[in-house]
């Protein structure tokens, strides 16, 4: 995680402006909450959802992105043990967006690698599996300057080839967006 932080800070510093312009570079740092979906999710609480990534403007309305994410959903108070599922993902995607100032909207999708860890804290038990994941998300952005904006994002994520059933979750995040030309 420390290497990802250093990489993202370096990109913000050295990346050659705003919005989804052709040839622009962007950095996206987000934080929020995630809710597990599907069978068994009624016993799961909201957990943290973090994301960091870089993007490149292919034209005025399309960006290519690479993002790393971390989500952890765990049991709620109705279960007397602490157990949960933590997912680390590395994905590539394509984002389509409107190019209106200061507000814009986007839709993004993609896929990549997932590392899923199921754990039970009191018994010090954990199981780790690697597989794939896919995601779709939509969001609204407000730009404060040509370089900085905030984006509210809602998504749907699903693991592929991990365990007997796919793990699904819905993150809701506030992203800090930095763009440079």
Image (cartoon, grey):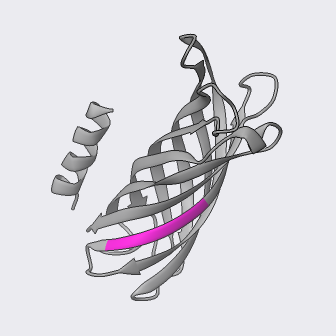
What number of labels is visible? 0
Q: Position of residue 142 (x, y in %)?
A: 41, 80
Q: Which corner quadrant of the image does residue 147 belong to?
A: bottom left
Residue name at image x 62 percent, y 43 percent: 111
Residue 83 lies left or right of residue 66; in this view the side is right
Answer with the quarter of the image where residue 28 lies: bottom left
Against 93, residue 80 (above or below) is: above
* The furthest residue to the bottom: 101
Which image quarter: residue 79? top right
In the rendered image, the quadrant that contains the C terminus is bottom left
The image shows residue 117 at horizontal and vertical percentages of 58, 23
Residue at the location (41% across, 62% down)? 175
Residue 72 makes an appearance in the image: yes
Q: Is residue 27 above or below residue 40?
A: below
Q: Which residue lies at the image location 58% right of the left edge and 14% below the top edge?
A: 126
Residue 153 sits inside the magenta stretch: yes
Q: Position of residue 158 (x, y in %)?
A: 70, 42
Image point (61%, 30%), residue name:
85
Find out whether residue 97 is within the magenta segment.
no
Rendered location of residue 12, percent (x, y): 22, 56
Range drawn in magenta = 149-154
**Is most of the magenta stretch helix, strand or loop?**
strand
Quadrant location of the N terminus? top left
Closer to us: 66 or 140: 140
Residue placed most toward the observer, 6 or 35:
35
């Amino acid at each position: 995680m420390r290497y990802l932080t250093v990489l993202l800070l370096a990109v913000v510093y050295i990346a050659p402006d705003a919005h989804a312009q052709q040839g622009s570079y962007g950095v996206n740092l987000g934080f929020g909450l995630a809710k597990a979906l599907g069978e068994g999710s009624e016993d799961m609480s909201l957990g943290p959802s973090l994301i960091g990534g870089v993007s490149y403007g292919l034209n005025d309305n399309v960006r290519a992105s690479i993002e790393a994410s971390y989500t952890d959903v765990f049991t709620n108070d109705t279960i007397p043990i602490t157990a949960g599922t933590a997912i680390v993902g590395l994905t590539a995607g394509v984002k389509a967006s409107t190019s209106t100032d200061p507000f814009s909207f986007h839709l993004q999708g993609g896929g990549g690698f997932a590392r899923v860890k199921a754990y039970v804290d009191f018994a010090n038990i954990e199981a780790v599996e690697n597989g794939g994941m896919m995601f779709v998300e939509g969001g609204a952005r407000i730009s404060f300057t040509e370089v900085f904006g905030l984006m509210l994002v809602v998504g749907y994520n699903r693991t592929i080839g991990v365990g007997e059933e796919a793990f699904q979750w819905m993150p809701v995040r506030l992203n800090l967006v930095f763009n440079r030309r």
